[in-house]
């Protein structure tokens, strides 16, 4: 088989489907031949996306119908409960997201799917996409979300063991979630718990580590049990598990252009650097990128790359170095961040949307010695790269 089409999307996961939905909203699927190549069936809830949103971002505007739970207040490494206004913390189950987008794509005669695993994308007059089963497709544009290779020195993992639990005991406050509760044992990195009640009888509890070594389920389960006891919940059962890991590295950052791409073969999703190095959040970045790509296609402008502004890459680098090399201090540093700044300011900073004076306030409130040490180490690294010593 050797078929030619206008646009190929490789991978129908988070970013591939976000792009297809953006093409649908822009009316592009009516006119152009679009092919989605996906290796898996994708009919399971293989992940749950959570993120904060102030409803102005593309993620909310495009995918609010898939949101299954909204929390307006949060507890965390600060006193009492905080309102997150103008933000809310929201949850999207991937199964709902896949169904929602697949329904929107159903009635386009020019949209096709192919189930198979892409082996290679190469460039001739058009881009050639070769699959493991021998099929070949060519097209003007290829949007590629195959998982990235991860050979980076600074690579650490955000590993997590999450349980969706059901309990007979009533969960008291279902409008408030707990974000990054560091009051758990600290070992081999930075560890914390998320508590996300979804109804009076159900919640998602997730134990997370930022570190080189990945969490085991046995170790995490014992800590989850203790944590639930602390919340007064003793009678519970697991209805779903989410055990996985997300790479955290500045190596994939879009500005370093890790993957060779040209203006017609464009990386999207994790491959494009959507995963923010210091937090592991990606959803809002790849949705925003998808929207910008669809707009560019509509207006016949050059396709934009996913981009993290330079200064935020530097902040990420400083934080990553502290996480990996100052294990004994990092919990205190994060607690200080949350105690001294309101959540909306921290969210803006993590979204790379803060103003420079807010970033200055955040940096100024950090413990000076470790921060200067991290800056010094970054400068030494840069000199080494330049002078090759
Ligand atoms: C369990 C989990 C939970 C997460 N939770 C959050 C969260 O709460 N908030 C957040 O912001 N981020 C989260 N992330 C990070 C990030 O949002 C996700 O990893 C997101 O799915 C990345 O989108 P993607 O399109 O790059 O990759 P994917 O969604 O993994 O999509 C890639 C697709 O490509 C297909 N594929 C792979 N290789 C080939 C090939 N050779 N040929 C054809 N198809 C191929 C795969 O089957 C897959 O469907 C989470 C990640 C995981 C793993």
Image (spheres, rainbow, N blue to C red):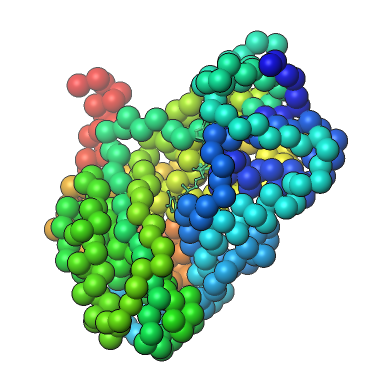
Instruction: Provide residue 255's location: percent of width, then percent of height.
Output: 48, 34
Seen at 51% across and 55% down, the residue is: 45
In which quarter of the view is residue 247 placed?
Answer: top left
Seen at 81% across and 46% down, the residue is: 107
User: How many circles with numbers are drawn on the protein?
Assistant: 0
The answer to whether any part of residue 16 appears in the image is yes
Q: Please state which of residues 293 and 176 is positioned toward the viewer in this rendering.
A: 176
- Is 294 on the left or on the right of 117, as rendered? right
In which quarter of the view is residue 171 placed?
Answer: bottom left
Quarter of the image for the N terminus: give it.
Answer: top right
Q: Please state which of residues 154 and 9 is positioned toward the viewer in this rendering.
A: 9
Instruction: Provide residue 371's location: percent of width, then percent of height.
Output: 24, 53
The answer to whether any part of residue 190 appears in the image is no
Seen at 47% across and 54% down, the residue is: 47
- Is 7 on the left or on the right of 287, as rendered? right
- Is 84 on the left or on the right of 127, as rendered? left
Q: Please state which of residues 225 and 345 is positioned toward the viewer in this rendering.
A: 225
Instruction: Provide residue 55's location: percent of width, then percent of height.
Output: 63, 67
Q: Please state which of residues 220 and 354 is positioned toward the viewer in this rendering.
A: 220
Instruction: Provide residue 183's location: percent of width, then percent of height.
Output: 22, 72
Residue 208, placed above or below residue 128: below
- Is 6 on the left or on the right of 210, as rendered? right
Quarter of the image for the C terminus: give it.
Answer: top left
Seen at 56% across and 65% down, the residue is: 53
In which quarter of the view is residue 163 placed?
Answer: bottom left
Residue 371, placed above or below residue 300: below
Residue 89, placed above or below residue 48: below
């Amino acid at each position: 088989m050797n078929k030619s089409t206008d646009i190929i999307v490789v991978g129908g996961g988070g970013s591939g489907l976000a792009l297809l939905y953006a093409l649908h909203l822009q009316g592009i699927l009516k006119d152009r031949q679009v092919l989605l190549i996906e290796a898996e069936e994708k009919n399971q809830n293989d992940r749950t996306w959570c993120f904060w949103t102030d409803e102005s971002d593309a993620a909310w505007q495009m995918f609010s119908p898939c949101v299954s739970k909204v929390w307006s207040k949060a507890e965390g490494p600060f006193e009492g409960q905080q309102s997150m206004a103008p933000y809310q913390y929201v949850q999207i189950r991937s199964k709902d997201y896949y169904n929602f987008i697949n329904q929107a794509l159903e009635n386009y005669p020019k949209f096709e799917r192919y189930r198979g695993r892409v082996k290679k994308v190469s460039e001739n007059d058009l881009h050639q996409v070769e699959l493991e089963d021998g099929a070949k497709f060519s097209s003007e544009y290829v949007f590629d979300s195959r998982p990235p290779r991860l050979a980076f020195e600074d690579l650490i993992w955000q590993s997590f063991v999450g349980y969706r639990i059901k309990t007979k005991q009533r969960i008291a406050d279902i409008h408030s979630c707990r974000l990054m509760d560091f009051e758990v044992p600290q070992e081999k990195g930075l560890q914390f718990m998320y508590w996300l009640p979804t109804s009076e009888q159900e919640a998602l509890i997730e134990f997370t580590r930022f570190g080189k070594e990945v969490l085991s389920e046995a170790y995490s389960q014992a800590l989850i049990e203790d944590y639930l006891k602390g919340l007064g919940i003793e009678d519970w059962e697991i209805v779903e598990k989410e055990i996985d890991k997300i790479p955290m590295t500045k190596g994939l950052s879009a500005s370093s252009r890790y993957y060779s791409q040209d203006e017609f073969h464009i990386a999207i999703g994790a491959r494009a650097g959507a995963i923010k190095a210091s937090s592991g959040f990606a959803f809002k970045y790849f949705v925003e990128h998808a929207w910008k790509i669809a707009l560019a296609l509509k207006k016949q402008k050059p396709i934009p790359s996913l981009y993290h502004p330079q200064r935020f890459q530097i902040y990420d680098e400083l934080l990553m170095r502290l996480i990996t090399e100052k294990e004994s201090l990092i919990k205190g540093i994060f607690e200080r961040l949350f105690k001294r700044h309101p959540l909306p300011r921290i969210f803006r900073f993590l979204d790379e949307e803060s103003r420079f004076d807010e970033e200055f306030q955040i940096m100024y409130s950090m413990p000076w010695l470790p921060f200067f040490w991290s800056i010094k180490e970054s400068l030494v690294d840069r000199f080494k790269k330049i002078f090759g010593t």
